[in-house]
């Protein structure tokens, strides 16, 4: 399945929490699939046209990149969160990714 196909499935979630987490999961998948490659993750999340859902994709990816400590993970996580379009959500992205950093 491609990102657009998965978004269609996510839209069918029974409530907002399920839909949001489904979009985070797309971000997790992209982070793992592209082993933390910033440009590839950004390119794929851009396929999601709804701003909130686009941002949730980036949040999930930022969390996974930080958790996995992929190459250049600090820069990638910052780049993903900086690309979040809604300012309150951008701040949440930073908090969530930082919480998952394993020292």
Image (cartoon, rainbow, N blue to C red):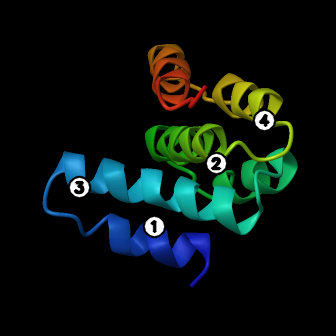
Query: Label 1 belongs to which residue?
Result: 7
Q: Name the residue rendered at 21%, 46% in the picture.
A: 17
Is the Cβ of the residue at disc 4 closer than 8 Å to that at disc 3? Answer: no
CA neighbours of label 2 inside 10 A, class few (<14), some (14 to 19), many (20+): some
Q: Name the residue rendered at 45%, 20% in the picture.
A: 92
How far across and how far down the image is residue 88, in percent?
45, 14
Q: Secondary structure at mark 1?
A: helix
Query: Label 3 belongs to which residue?
Result: 18
Question: Farthest residue in the bottom direction?
Answer: 1
**Image height of 60 relative to 27, above or below:** above
Disc on the earlier residue, 4 or 1:
1
Is the Cβ of the residue at disc 4 closer than 8 Å to that at disc 2? Answer: no
Give the total of numbered labels: 4
Disc on the earlier residue, 4 or 3:
3
Query: Label 4 belongs to which residue?
Result: 76
Disc on the earlier residue, 4 or 2:
2
Dot label at residue 68: 2
Disc on the earlier residue, 3 or 1:
1
């Amino acid at each position: 399945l491609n990102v657009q196909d998965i978004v269609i499935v996510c839209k069918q979630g029974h409530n907002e929490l399920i839909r949001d987490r489904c979009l985070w999961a797309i971000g997790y998948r992209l982070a793992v699939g592209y082993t933390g490659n910033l440009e590839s993750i950004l390119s794929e999340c851009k396929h999601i046209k709804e701003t909130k859902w686009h941002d949730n994709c980036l949040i999930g990816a930022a969390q996974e990149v930080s958790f996995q400590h992929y190459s250049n993970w600090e820069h990638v996580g910052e780049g993903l969160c900086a690309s979040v379009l809604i300012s309150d959500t951008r701040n949440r992205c930073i908090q969530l990714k930082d919480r998952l950093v394993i020292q």
